[in-house]
Image (cartoon, grey):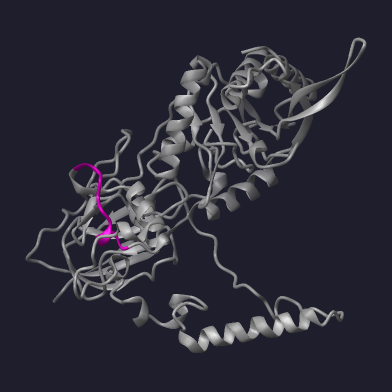
Amino acid sequence: MSQTKTFLLPDLGEGLPDATIVEWFVREGDTVALDAPLVSMETAKAVVEVPSPVSGKVLRLAGAAGEVVPTGAMLAEFELDPNRPQRADGQDTGHSHAAPKPASAAASPAPAPAPMPAVESFDHERDDAGTVVGAMQASDAVQVQAAVAVGGVKAMPAVRAMARKLGVDLARVRATGADGVVTMADVKQAAADGSLLLPSPAGATVHGMRATGAHASERPRDERGPGRGAGAGGEGAAAGHVAARTALSASGKPMRTQPPGVVASGQPEPLKGVRRNMARVMADAHAKVVATTLNDDADVQAWTPASDVTARLVRGIVAACTAVPAMNAWFDGDALTRTLHPHVDIGIAVDTDEGLFVPALRNADLLDARGVREGVNRLRTQVLERSLPASELTGYTISLSNFGMFAGRYATPIVVPPCVAIVAAGRARFQMTPVMGGFESRKVIPLSVTFDHRACTGGEAARFLRALIDDLALAD
């Protein structure tokens, strides 16, 4: 009698409640080997390739690409093959299949995305068991994902996810990475210029669809999405709707609109990955923190035209944290305890199409301007390539959001526990400033500092802001 095994979605990183299916590498009915690539899953922190826990036949899969699977729920079901290698009973695979603990039961809350975008992608140590799953022993060592060959193509999980998002056939992308690995840059260049794609082999299907077992034209309409692959009839109906709406609008007569439940121009879609986690974190932070914001302007007239704004803001925050340590701290609202940090690890908000990331610039108090710039550039590259270790998205002691490159003067950014403060920098401008004997046009940067009033007094926050302004006023 054959034996079946149900594989539950493991915790792919620090108690995350769910993950989104990016791409299946097998179909129901396929035979898979132990530790062979099974599925690519996206969490709030990374795109992870999950290997098969057994050798055998795939009986059932959890869902299609794009669907969200809760941690601890069924991911796949197998019929074990007694003639092929299997993992020994009790062998540690390096991951947990238990459902995530409630937030209130966590040993200590971990920082997560700050709410404001950064002007650019602007090293405290903690225990971390890594986010790699498979036949690995649990360890505090940082695990590095390797490029896995699927369908004859070597690529990192994040690169496969990006190719799927951009509609690029990985099998036709020219690989420039070491050992024939397709890089993120290769995929983006192929998406921007189709002439760079290799010729499609005769009879080959799109690589992204091969794993699901169906070409786009063979999939049900609801999987292709509204308006995609619907044929001339669908396109004609859409065009007719637009034409009718235009005629009504052109009549110039008042029109009564209908509630969204009756007529809607768009379709609701579930938040996934980074945005899904961001929504949870922001709601939790808003409910738990007693936030207060102070605003002021920093006179930066003494800066040279080549001044690095990010480096100066980081230097100013370090100086302010040195002057007022209470703002460089963690606060536990349940135990009513405060932890002051001797070092300054700044979480710098990085805005991406997938959502907001806040990697930590470690030991900012030890870095000069060049070190800050190199660290920021490294973090930005790792965020965009989704190669940043999960441990680098936690543990910062204060955060920075430099949204001024886009627009806006002041803000009320959200403090994410256990941190107690966040600095936000707005768009620089020139303003007339009274000076002895008249007025001068001076360049200023608007600043906003939001702090948790349970952990910091108004006086501490004001002195912190004063120290930040004073440091920014200095010449390079």
Q: Is residue 268 above or below residue 333?
A: below
Q: Residue at x 63, y 34 (%)?
A: 402
Q: Quadrant of the N terminus?
A: bottom left
Most foreground residue, 182 or 262: 182
Instruction: Estimate the x, y position of residue 137 in percent, counting from the top left.
Output: 24, 41
Q: Residue furthest right?
A: 437
Q: In the shown orientation, is residue 132 left or right of residue 447?
A: left
Instruction: Estimate the x, y position of residue 29 in percent, counting from the top left.
Output: 22, 76
Magenta extent? 169-178
Taking the image as drawn, is residue 415 in sight? no
> In the figure, residue 59 lies in which quadrant?
bottom left
Instruction: Estimate the x, y position of residue 275 in percent, counting from the top left.
Output: 54, 53
Q: Residue furthest left?
A: 83
Q: Residue at x 53, y 25 (%)?
A: 345
* Residue 175 is inside the magenta segment: yes
Q: In the shown orientation, is residue 116 left or right of residue 83?
A: right
Q: Residue furthest bottom?
A: 233
Instruction: Estimate the x, y position of residue 36 in percent, counting from the top left.
Output: 20, 58
Per the picture, the main secondary structure of the magenta-coloured stretch is loop
